[in-house]
Image (cartoon, rainbow, N blue to C red):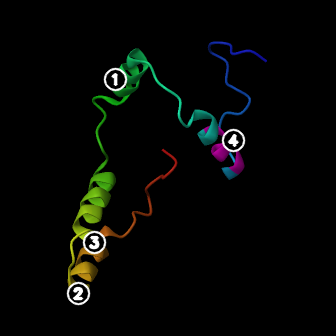
Amino acid sequence: MAFVLGQVPWNNGIEQTDEVKQKIGRANRGKIRTAEARLRMGASHRGRKHSEETKRKMSLSKWLTVEHSASAVADRLIPMAPNANYDHRR
């Protein structure tokens, strides 16, 4: 079955198994990308903004790399509880 512009692919929304992800990773590992391809990949994400939740996670990760007391860690983690309304599949 060939790609047809405007058609929904048969595997749209189907999760890939860990085995398939590993096979794809092995197939792509070590590939040399052209300069043009690297520029296109970089441009595809340029201008995207991190969500507020992602910013908090990055801040927490950076903060946890420094040694802090247990009470300071607990004070920092409680406000970072996951948002029940957050859709992680975005």
Label 4 sits on a secondary structure element that is: loop
Let me know if residue 22 is in the magenta part: yes
Asked which secondary structure carries label 1, the reply is helix
Under mark 2, the amino acid is: Ser
Which label sits in the foreground, 2 or 3? Answer: 2
Q: Nearer the viewer, mark 4 or mark 1?
A: 1
At x 35%, y 20%, the residue is: 39
Question: Which residue in the structure is indicated by mark 1?
Answer: 43
What residue did someone put label 4 on? 14
Q: Are marks 2 and 1 in contact (CB under 8 Å)?
A: no
Comparing 73 with 13, the one in front is: 73
Q: Residue furthest top?
A: 5
Quadrant containing the N terminus in the rendered view: top right
Q: At numbered mark 3, what does the secondary structure look like: helix, strand or loop?
A: helix
Q: Which residue is mark 2?
A: 71
Q: Which residue is depicted at the point 64% across and 46% down?
A: 22
Is 44 situated above or below 57? above
Question: How far apart, in angstroms, are the residues tagged by discs 2 and 1?
Answer: 43 Å
Q: Compare marks 1 and 3 and give the one earlier in the sequence.
A: 1
Query: Of discs 2 and 1, which sits in the foreground?
Result: 1
Q: Amino acid at mark 3?
A: Pro
Labelled disc at residue 79: 3
Is the residue marked by circle 1 packed among few (<14), some (14-19), or many (20+) residues within 10 Å?
Answer: few
Labels 1, 3: front one: 1
- Residue 69 % position (x, y): 21, 85
Q: Which label's residue is closer to the chain start, 2 or 1? A: 1
